Amino acid sequence: MIGAFTFNTSQRIVFETGSAAKLDAHAASFLGPRPFLVTDPGIIGLDLQGPCEAALRQAGHQLSRFADVAADPPRALVDAAVDAARQHGATSVIGFGGGSSLDVAKLVALVLGSGEDLDDAWGIGKAKGPRLPLILVPTTAGTGSEVTPISIITVGEEEKRGVVSPLLLPDIAVLDPLLTLGLPAPVTAATGIDAMVHAIEAFASRSANNNPVSRTLAVEALRLLGANIEKAVFTPGDADARGAMLLGSLLAGMAFANSPVAAVHALAYPIGGTFHVPHGLSNALVLPHVLKFNNSVAAATYAEIAPAVFPQLTNIADGSDRAEVFAAMLTDLSRNLGLHTRLRDVGIGKKDLPKLARDAMKQTRLLVNNPKEITEADAFEIYRAAL
């Protein structure tokens, strides 16, 4: 019997090569006269946003840009973006870039549209809304932020906080594979593994809202990502592989937006917050070790999805053995893609593990979804295994 569940996603999704340069047409009903674009210096340096901005201005829109987004954006940066958008008299917000830019854009649209204090919106379902019209254009194949109701911000020196609300789902998500062609190999690899983590954790989530739609999307996401991540990294001009990665990231995002992620993310956030390791790489560093920890209760689940990433694993009949090999092959995949595979490779030592474990325990909204309960002592041992 299929239990009750809800499934939310972005109102409209456009997947088309060259679609970013047609944003004025695709998002015409949402933009208003004074759109406000949120992005980062890397995007500006590559001029990825150039054709989009030109099309908007040619269509008569008075466009303003905020281009100061950084990885792991702090609260002060969000406040600065809100102030800039308010001064512009923004009628809509366009997030253009990686997950950080999209997350900042979500909160700018929320705060400007509702006037609410961001401190009252942290957590699940606490944002009141309404928000300004929101358009999201991802330039990486990893976060899936364009279809998730989540925005993660760094508060204080290290703490990650999230606003989780269907209000943060955009009015339209525009996916253009051309925007991902210029991604450096390390970013392509890390964001690709990040998308895999979203799909794996969504499929295995202990959330009461784990549902057949999310699980189906997760499997297809893993099939696309597994078949194309090496081509995307080592043949960066392969538009077909880039498009498949972008679609895989989208499907994984849709999956975990409704069947939430768990301990991999919970243990990754302190790594990023304290040591400023990119989010995708933080996930990759702990992924196999969390899977091994969970295998005592979730081996059959992991064995079910493993062949979507590595088809050769169908040759291993025993579920426990297949799950163990799956975790090991994910480590090998990261290594083959040129990613670090040990915490010590990113400057983390044994003396840092107790604090990481303590900080991971603060991620209660994520830990509750893990297939197996994790204590602080368990978190320490997982980090030690990853060291």
Image (spheres, rainbow, N blue to C red):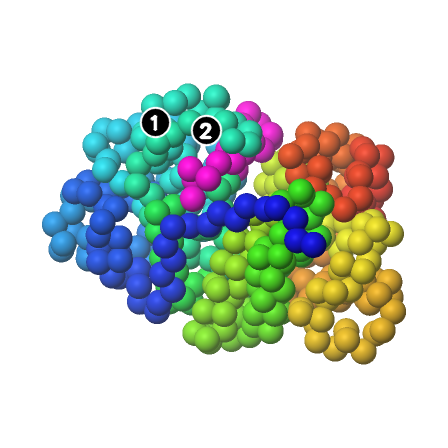
Q: Is 37 or 2 nearer to us in this picture?
A: 2
**Cβ–Cβ under 8 Å for marks 1 and 2:** yes
Q: Which residues are magenta?
A: 152-169
Q: Where in the figure is residue 46, as x and y percent of width and height? A: 35, 58
Q: How many marks?
A: 2
Say if the magenta span includes residue 166.
Answer: yes
Describe the element under mark 2 as helix, strand or loop: loop
Q: Is 254 or 71 nearer to us in this picture?
A: 254
Cα distance in 3D space between marks 1 and 2: 9 Å
Residue shown at the point (68%, 32%) measured from the top left: 364
Mark 1 is on which residue type?
Answer: Ser
Q: Which residue is mark 1?
A: 114
Mark 2 is on which residue type?
Answer: Ala
Q: Where in the figure is residue 76, as x and y percent of width and height? A: 43, 27
Q: Is residue 90 left or right of residue 275?
A: left
Q: Is residue 117 above or below residue 20?
A: above
Q: Which residue is mark 2?
A: 127
Q: Quadrant of residue 295?
A: bottom right
Q: Is 44 or 181 nearer to us in this picture?
A: 181
Q: Is residue 153 left or right of residue 133?
A: right
Q: Where in the figure is residue 1, as x and y percent of width and height? A: 69, 54
Look at the image and tell me whether residue 192 can be seen.
no
